[in-house]
Image (cartoon, rainbow, N blue to C red):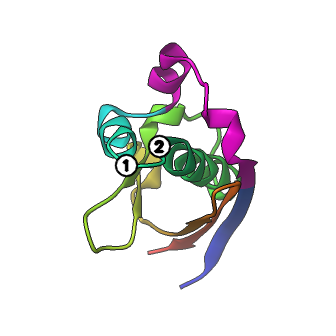
Amino acid sequence: MAICGIGVDMEKVSRFENASPALLRRIFTEAELSFCLKTLKPAMHLAARFCAKEAAFKALPFKEIAFKNIEVLSAPGAKPELKVHDKRADGFRIDLSISHTDDAAVAFVVVSEN
């Protein structure tokens, strides 16, 4: 399995503390917003998902993809997964690692041939 791309991104959580609802709707899917806004610290989770999307932009072997076509799927007790809603992503394996503190979030994405 050959690696096609890697990407990393880090953001301050504070960037998402007072983000407008319009901006959040432009960046995140309804499922992402639903998950994040139900947590005790939504900005921390929003920042982590934003990092995942930015890291994916850097790692994917194609460009020009909308924020909402890259989605972080979260299930209780399971690690987050990155889903790319674009036919060009077929045939690629996408691995995601995210982490956050109260102040910062980081994500690392590896794209490899499936």
Q: Position of residue 49 (x, y in %)?
A: 52, 49
Write down the residue under mark 2.
42
63, 108: nearer the viewer: 108
Which label is found at residue 39?
Answer: 1
Residue at x 52% of width, y 43% of height = 46
Q: Find residue 99 and report its horizontal and vertical position in percent.
A: 59, 67
Question: Which residue is pictured at 52% across the width and 30% down the height?
Answer: 27
Left of 25 or right of it: where is 17?
right
Residue positioned most to the left: 76
- Give residue 57's position: percent from left, percent from top: 65, 47
Which disc number belongs to residue 112? none
Specify the segment rendered in magenta: 10-27
Query: At numbered mark 2, what does the secondary structure look like: helix, strand or loop?
Result: helix
Label 1: how many residues lie within 10 Å, few (<14), some (14-19) or many (20+)? few
Picture mark count:
2
Q: Amino acid at mark 1?
A: Thr
Q: CA distance from mark 2 to mark 1?
A: 5 Å
Q: Amino acid at mark 2?
A: Pro
Q: Residue 22: say if magenta.
A: yes
Say if mark 2 contacts mark 1, CB within 8 Å.
yes
- Give the dominant element type of the magenta stretch: helix, strand or loop: helix
